[in-house]
Amino acid sequence: MNRIAASATMGAFAGSLLAGGYLSAPFLGLHLSPSLILVLAASVAFGSSVTVISLNLLAQKAEKPTGGKLLGLQLKDADNLIHKFPGRAGALDLSIRADQKIDQLEIFKNPDGYKDKDITVRLRGSSTKFNPIDLRQLFVALNQQPGFLHLILLDRNDEFIGYLPGFAAKREFTRDNAESMIARFLVQVFDDDANSANLTLIDGAGKTDIVSDETKVGQLIDKMAGGFKRLIVLKNGYHRRPVGLVNFNDLLVGTMRSAVSTNAEPAGVSLLGSLH
């Protein structure tokens, strides 16, 4: 309704402006054309055209969801709330098992070819145990890649058992005691996925730090407000399909602000008001 009123006002103003120019001509000492009636008709037509164009342009602006509407959306339908795996278009999704030779990986042999790519690494469990020395070699190579974003741990059935952000893997697994850190936070998780709870100590997420992409945004906020820094998003809640993650700070401070704020009300006020 506001769009219609605004468009009608703009159209009437445009038509009146054009007609007024001709009507005021005698007062300015200008000759008034006999075709005044045609000019007025043209003015009305012009104003009507502006009205139609304005209405179409205003209608094209997508309306932001209100706080209540957004909180009722399923996570998979809420734009920009999930950091998707493996990353932006063209991202490298690197799958590694314990029996693979790290120095034979293309990212190891040709590191400069991946400097501008997002990188996700999936360590997949098998009957062979990962060697901490080999994994340190991998992380030293990844430490040179600014786009290394995600480290995902999957068991031998390809089910999710743990996660670390790339910055944490670089920080913890390239230092002097890297092998012991890798043994504790990676190898032992493959031995017993209950050990994945330790990943939260180094900014990661364990096997139970998960949420389905069918969860409503309001429910997600309630859950994360209970102390979760990040949650791994599973497609339909199925452990074989980690599709991305949500960070608590991004959820409330970043992406949610642009989606929730309506009128001049701050996003945090609108969001918290909807929760209560």
Image (tube, rainbow, N blue to C red):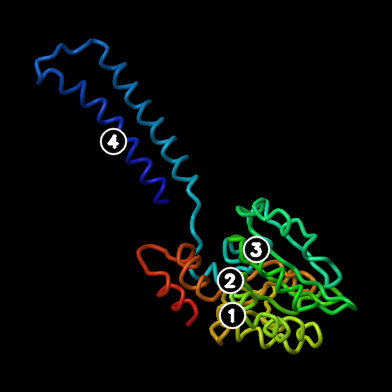
The residue shown at (70%, 81%) is: 179
Residue 153 in percent (x, y) is at 75, 75
Secondary structure at numbered mark 3: strand
Residue, disc 1? 203
Left or right, residue 226 beside residue 261: right
Asked if the residues shown at circle 1 and circle 2 are in contact, with their CB atoms under 8 angstroms apart, the answer is: yes
Secondary structure at numbered mark 2: helix
Secondary structure at numbered mark 4: helix
Residue type pointed to by label 1 = Asp
Residue, disc 4? 13
Of the two numbered discs 1 and 3 on the same chain, state the one appearing first in sequence: 3
Residue, disc 2? 167
Left or right, residue 23 beside residue 71: left
Of the two numbered discs 2 and 3 on the same chain, state the one appearing first in sequence: 3
Secondary structure at numbered mark 1: loop
Of the two numbered discs 2 and 4 on the same chain, state the one appearing first in sequence: 4
Residue 207 in percent (x, y) is at 72, 82
Disc 4 residue crowd, few under 14, some 14–19, many 20+, Cα 10 Å: some
Q: Quadrant of residue 182?
A: bottom right
Of the two numbered discs 3 and 4 on the same chain, state the one appearing first in sequence: 4
Residue type pointed to by label 2 = Phe
Residue type pointed to by label 3 = Lys
Label annotation for residue 84:
3
Spatial distance from mark 1 to mark 2, Cα to Cα?
9 Å
Asked if the residues shown at circle 2 and circle 4 are in contact, with their CB atoms under 8 angstroms apart, the answer is: no
The residue shown at (37%, 46%) is: 5
